Image: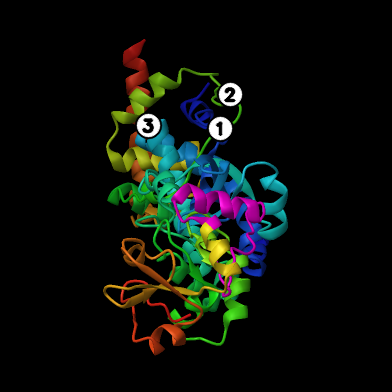
Amino acid sequence: MSIEQQLEQLSGGLPHGLSEGVALGTGLAEGYDLYDSALGDVIVTFNPQGVSSLDIADGFEDRYAERFGRPLMRAEAPSAWRGHVQEAIERGSPGRLPVDLRSVTEFQEKVLRTTATIPKGEVRPYGWVAYEIHSPRAVRAVGSAVARNPIPLIIPCHRVVRTDGHIGNYSLGGPHNKVELLEHEGAMPHLLEDLASQNVRVRGDAVTRVYCHPTCRVVRDASEVIDFRSTTAAEDDGYRPCEVCRPHG
Amino acid sequence: MDDLANALAADLDTSFPTVVETMGTQLFWGLRRICGDHQEAEDLTQETFIRAYRALGGYDADRIRAMSLRPWLWTIAMNLGRNHVRDKSRRPTYVEMTETGNEDPEPIDQAAWDQRLSALSSDQRTAVVLRHVVGLGIAEISQITGRPEGTVKADVHRGLSRLREMIEREQ
């Protein structure tokens, strides 16, 4: 055999995993991996831009196909932020984890980024989110944006409740999961339901005369708590709004 | 080749996997023989395609239709090889679900060939591999390496002579 013929034989097939690696690296396919959460096993999907969705593991592939319809393959998250995924799920906020919200509108993204600022163990009404994004009248649109949150748990939409104070709906497996998550975080969902039934919207610290959302850490530390049916009622009694939870919604 | 460029111009996302399938094998094996390392060649091949995809995303359809994909991909690959630029840590890593066998056929002693090729100068090795392992023409190699055709021809010729001497010495 001539040298040229031997050189021709120095190649073989395409290495396994190469096409997949390119698909993941270009974002033409998304990767997914399994993580642990307060609601059991969840699937997180990601691409080079960041985490793009989170869902309950059971039956996720069909739901993903229906909503996102992209090729999907088992993968490890990019090593640059692999370690932040589990942390973000536990903390209930992205922190340093990049999130890819290209699947939602600009308005929805604003809603979700604001939602991500609600501290663990606290809740805010839809109206509060609307106010924070300078669209105080868009409460209903905020509700739909939260319901379409592609990355629940990491973007903590379970911390957004109805404007009347009731816990309300939840997209990740139903409202009982919302109650369970809030319980798990110490946000007292049963007290919240009680307060909502009594039409209580905000609570005041009788000593400092500051009023808050009921789960705000400021009023939870108060020695004497006064309940109000509206922010106006609180203001009429000479209370001023808390600077931490900004109870305007 | 032109069909593929036309398909890419019409729908980049749908056609790009076909580019990987049709050009991935020769790109990988060429790089594998030039750099001598399986993993590095795989990384370089992936990175080449990812860069190519990003670049194509910014080109208009006419520009893509007019492209010669093969030398263009090799030019990206050779630049990457020189610069050793990586951003692997920002990408998901594929997890193989099934155990697969070695894809390399072994009709000839590959290790011996890797050793012989590594003894050539980098220019000669690149020219010999692109000409005889990958099967590119002298004009294409000249375009990819940025060296005149006469120089490429001489590199291939001298590289082959040196390989022949090495084999004779081994016997």
Q: Is residue A69 left or right of residue B44?
A: right
x and y percent of residue A199 in the render? Answer: 57, 74
* Structural crowding at the residue carrying mark 3, measured as other residues with C-alpha within 10 Å and reported as few (<14), some (14–19) or many (≥20): few
Q: On screen, A51 above or below B34?
A: below
State which chain disc 1 sits on. B
Q: Is A236 on the left-hand or right-hand side of A190?
A: left
Q: Is residue A207 above or below residue A173?
A: below
Does residue A225 appear left or right of residue B140 in this picture?
left
> What kind of element bears circle 3?
loop
- Visual colour scheme: rainbow
- Other-residue count near label 2 (Cα within 10 Å), few / some / many at <14 / 14–19 / ≥20: few
Name the residue type under label 1: Glu
Q: Position of residue B149 (x, y in %)?
A: 39, 54
Q: Which residues are magenta?
A: A161-190
- Closer to the eye: label 1 or 3: 1
Residue located beneath label 2 in the image:
B99
**Is residue B4 shown to the viewer in this render?**
no
Q: Residue A182, how many percent across, how many down? A: 51, 54
Q: Which mark is residue B37?
A: 3
Q: Quadrant of residue B171?
A: top left
Say which label, 2 or 3, has the lower sequence index: 3
Q: Identify the secondary structure beneath mark 1.
A: loop
Q: Are marks 2 and 3 on the same chain?
A: yes
- Looking at the rendered image, the disc whose residue lies closer to the viewer, 2 or 3, is 2
Residue A39 falls within the magenta-colored stretch:
no
Q: Are marks 2 and 1 in contact (CB under 8 Å)?
A: yes
Q: What's the residue at 62%, 64% (across, down)?
A: A168
As drawn, the label of residue B96 is 1
